[in-house]
Image (tube, helix red, strand yellow):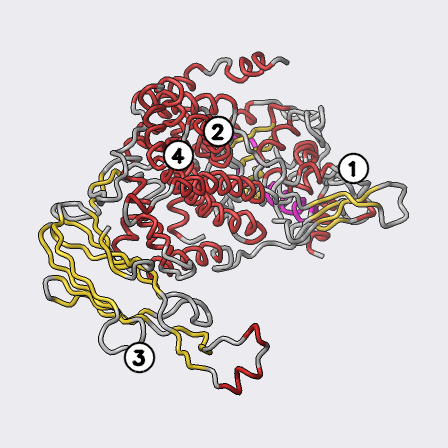
Amino acid sequence: MTSPRIAIRNGFDRAERLLDRVFGPDWNPLAQLGPLGWFLFWIVAVTGIYLFIFFDTGVHAAYESVEWLTEDHWWHAGVARSLHRYASDLMVLMMFTHLLREWSMDRYRGKRWFSWVTGVVVIWFVYLSGITGYWLVWDELAQYVAVVSTELLDTLGIFAEPIARNFLSPQMLSSRFFTLMVFLHIAIPLLLLLLMWVHIQRITEARTKPPKGLALITLGGLVVGSLILPATSQGPADLATVPRDVGIDWFLLSLYPVIESVPAGAIWAGVAGFTVLMAGLPWLPRRREGAAAEVFLDHCNGCSRCVADCPYAAITLVPRTDDLPFTHEALVDPARCVSCGICMGSCPSSTPFRRSGALVTGIDLPERPLSQVRAEVIAAAGMPAPGTGRVLTLSCAHGAGAAEAPGRVVLPCVAMAPPSLIDYIISRGLADGVAVAGCAERDCYNRFGVAWTEARFDRTRDPYLRERVPRERLLTVWAGPTEKVRLAGELKAFSDRLGAMPGFENVRPLTAEEAAEAVQEAAQ
Amino acid sequence: MSWAATWAAALRGRARHLVAGGVVSVALVLGAAVLSAWPDWQSLPEDGALLRLSFTHSGARNCRDRTEEELARLPPNMRGAQICERRRAPVHIEMDIDGRPVLTADLMPSGLAGSGPSRIYERIGLPAGQYALAIRMRDDPAASGFTHEAAFDILLEPAQSAAIDFDSVRNTFFLH
């Protein structure tokens, strides 16, 4: 990754560590930006429906009805109005933070392009939803937005008559125009909802709801903020005058001063350029990803664990195509597979103990097969330990243990390591204990790597870690890229703890012949 | 598990996070609330006013009388006296403020075939004050001089918006 991206990614990691302390890792808002965006959308939608009950669409009635609900009924409709506005503003903030974070974590290129490109379209629909909403209040800001918007649209030359003419004078404006705007302010958010749904189609178990605690905190913050600083209107619109000083909503309307200051052609070119650049970013340059996972039918019984564990909906079950007595087999969609290896870790055939014949599993990464991982583990076993006990570390390529180090095997995701590999390392005497160092607990680079690994070790998700593996000989460290010191400290302490323990009783040491065979097979 | 029990389980033992997170959340919302209406943007100078010229008007078509032979070839119900090109002429417009020309333009007809009306929407920012406006239009290139002319004396107050329009029924310019 390029250095500005690393700097931003590390900046996020540090900020998230701070917020881990404030909210707890599972409620960390920076790790829940997508779900928070959905939550804010629903707050905006529900409050919008509520406000519509009181809203009147006449030229004068629009402003009067908004004033009535803001002043006379501040305790319910006024609060709803503030929630509607502030949740919209926060949605913009969430959206761009989400975008920057995904970019900094390099989760927008390669097979992930679909979510990125659909997200770019979402940006514009969020803006359009907000702009049409501000229009409805019909105060000075609404007048400013209406005039500047229509003047800009007229430069396209696609309207039979300049639509800005509707705002030449008070007599020109019809109440029917507000009916149109209400329709747009309902239709555009509905399209936005559709796009948000499309945006999450290429991921499994998309999170559209934040954790309950975070939802409560967010809603509570919005209600308290709305009571302290309620949203108000500016003076009523008057087309016989020009709104001179307008209080701009800098989240949704920050482009308006630019529109006024720059020729329309430059604005349209900027909009088109931004859209094309953002949508094209996944190919500038294209990310080099490993080959997609491959299914080996002789070792696949169609158990569906890989289907359940794949974070990117890249694996499906299809009717069997061979003569084996199973009904289904796994099928990988190469266009969606990011080669994280989580499927390999989930496959019950992924057992490094096997000696008869080649080590082939049901689903494997062609560029990093299980046999190679086993050979790397054997090679790493002889390295010096950080303390008195021998530790072998399996780390992911995105957390604190991303860099190669003695005694460490770096995987695309720690969930790529099947639990039987932990068993293999300890029971074959390759190390006194195994440390699994993945991404920070709040957010896994491959979405479910941390969760699946924890569940497998806790024996609540297949494939289970075998009972015979002593839990005290297994350490999990969830640490982000800026937590190298903490990782090193935890590894040292773990190593010393292992050194103080009596040797593991059930070790059946790997023979030199077995080790040589494994390394030789991986080399073939 | 009931709805309340689900929530209670989700929040149990998290008082510190609820309070600390709540404080951060309120601070964020207040920040958003402030930025949702401040700082102001000044879209017009302190003593500025706005004059807009906007109208929609169709330029003349190039027409000629049909000959007797042409009329005879047509069905009786289609014997229009004139035949016109589909394309309309551009509308020429000139505008002066206090005798100074501020606008001269040939407004092209709209539509792919050039058969639609010509349109204009121009913003002219002015300091508040008294102005003498003169506007001239020629919608038929065959006409000598201008086909429509008008003059207005207006007093623009600060932040006032005035607009010059064209009434196609009365065939004259007027001030909004």
Q: Earlier in the sequence, mark 1 or mark 4?
A: 4
Q: Which residue is mark 3?
A: B142
Residue A373 vertical position relative to residue A261 in the rendered view, above or below: above
Against A85, is A148 above or below?
A: below
**Distance from Cα at disc 3 to Cα at disc 1:** 86 Å
Tell me the kind of residue under disc 4.
Leu
Amino acid on which the number 2 mark rests in the picture: Ile
Please give the chain letter of the residue carrying mark 1: A
Q: First in sequence: mark 2 or mark 4?
A: 2
Q: Which residues are magenta?
A: A370-392
Cα distance in 3D space between marks 3 and 2: 59 Å
| Mark 2 lies on residue | A49
User: Do we see residue A288 in this rendering?
Assistant: yes
Residue B23: give its label: none
Marks 1 and 2, how far apart at CA: 46 Å
Q: Residues within 10 Å of mark 1 (few under 14, many from 20)?
A: some
Q: Which residue is label 4 attached to?
A: A90
Position of the C terminus of chain A, as image quadrant, is bottom right
Task: Point out residue A294 in the picture as x, y percentages from the top left corner.
Answer: 72, 51
Q: Nearer the viewer, mark 4 or mark 3?
A: 3
Q: Quadrant of residue A154?
A: bottom left
Left or right of A392 on screen, residue A163: left
Tell me which corner region of the image, top left, top right, bottom left or bottom right, holds residue B103. bottom left
Q: Secondary structure at mark 1?
A: loop
Question: Which amino acid type is shown beneath numbered disc 3?
Answer: Ala
Q: Which residue is mark 1?
A: A303
